[in-house]
Image: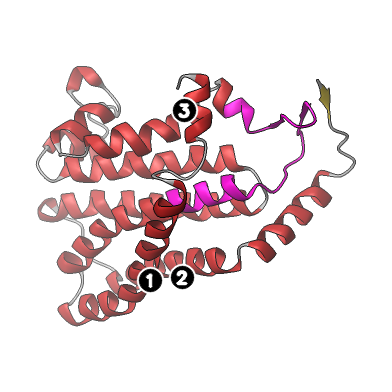
Amino acid sequence: MAVKNTPSLIAFETQVKKTTSKANQKEIELLTNTLNMYINGFNSIGSFTYNQDNEKETAWLLLVTRSFHSMRSALQLMLMGYYGQAISVLRTVTENFFICHDCIANPKAIEAILHNKYRIPDSNQKLSFRQMASRTGNMKIYEQDYAHQSAVTHPSALSLGIIRDPKTNTINVSPRYDKILFLDCCEMVFRNALMMNEFMARLLEKLSSKTKATSWAEKAKQTIEEASDWLKRMREEFGNITSLKQEEKNHGN
């Protein structure tokens, strides 16, 4: 096994970004529209006065904002070929989704987010992500999406295989474009964005005017439909969670 020569990391990143942009114009446009959907939502909320009556919404707003930042960061990593790192960042969005759902009926989740009274995750306080997913009816997402993201995030044959080229038996220190891995990241961005969209809609319902909430929903409808259609096409072509499923089987993950 050898390490590929890396004369200029910036040059490699620039080339990967050009290749990615040329090969995935439609995906990148839809990813951008998806992020803009969130920006429009934040602009529609504007400002509000925090009090004990809107602590749940405040927790949601913090988690949705953090998720937006994660999706934006993941997009930059995806474009430059850092797929494993993008997936690791996107895993935090799935975690935020579990917490958002748990905030609906579990005061401990809100107290953990706003008052640092508890730690997340903490199985002793029934605040592990598995416990939250089970409690809120999201075990399928935990067992599929989150398990896949975790398998790539943790050091394993699967995650380390992303930086290894089996054809040449070399380790890629510099990034490279990989269509399947890029599509896998796209799938996770869209799935996470659609999941967290539920809480953007809830925020607008509670913290914004009915007119602004309706206007945002109408503008977001096309993007949501396009992202849903894209996911459907990927499932038809690759199955659920586009990349690495075969690799997961090969490595026993």
Q: Do tag 1 and tag 2 residues touch (Cβ < 8 Å)?
A: yes
Marks 1 and 3, the one that precedes in the sequence? 3
What distance separates the C-alpha of mark 1 from that of mark 3?
29 Å
Foreground disc of the pair 3, 2 = 3
Decide which of 212, 172 is in the foreground and name it. 172
In-image side of 187 versus 215 (left or right): right
* Residue 109 x %, y %: 20, 36
What distance separates the C-alpha of mark 3 from that of mark 2?
29 Å
* Residue 26 x %, y %: 55, 69
Is residue 240 a member of the stretch shown in magenta?
A: no
Check disc 2 and report its element: helix, strand or loop: helix
**Quarter of the view holding residue 163:** top right
What distance separates the C-alpha of mark 1 from that of mark 2?
7 Å
Residue 11 in view in this figure = yes
Check disc 1 and report its element: helix, strand or loop: helix
Where does label 1 land, which residue?
Answer: 223
The region drawn magenta spans 159-188
Residue at 50 percent across and 37 percent down: it is: 88
Marks 3 and 2, the one that precedes in the sequence? 2
Q: Do tag 1 and tag 3 residues touch (Cβ < 8 Å)?
A: no
Residue at 37 percent across and 58 percent down: it is: 232
Label of residue 151 in the image:
3
Residue type indicated by callout 3: Ala
* Residue 15 x %, y %: 78, 55
* Residue 228 x %, y %: 35, 62
Label of residue 33 in the image:
2
Residue type indicated by callout 2: Asn
Residue type indicated by callout 1: Thr
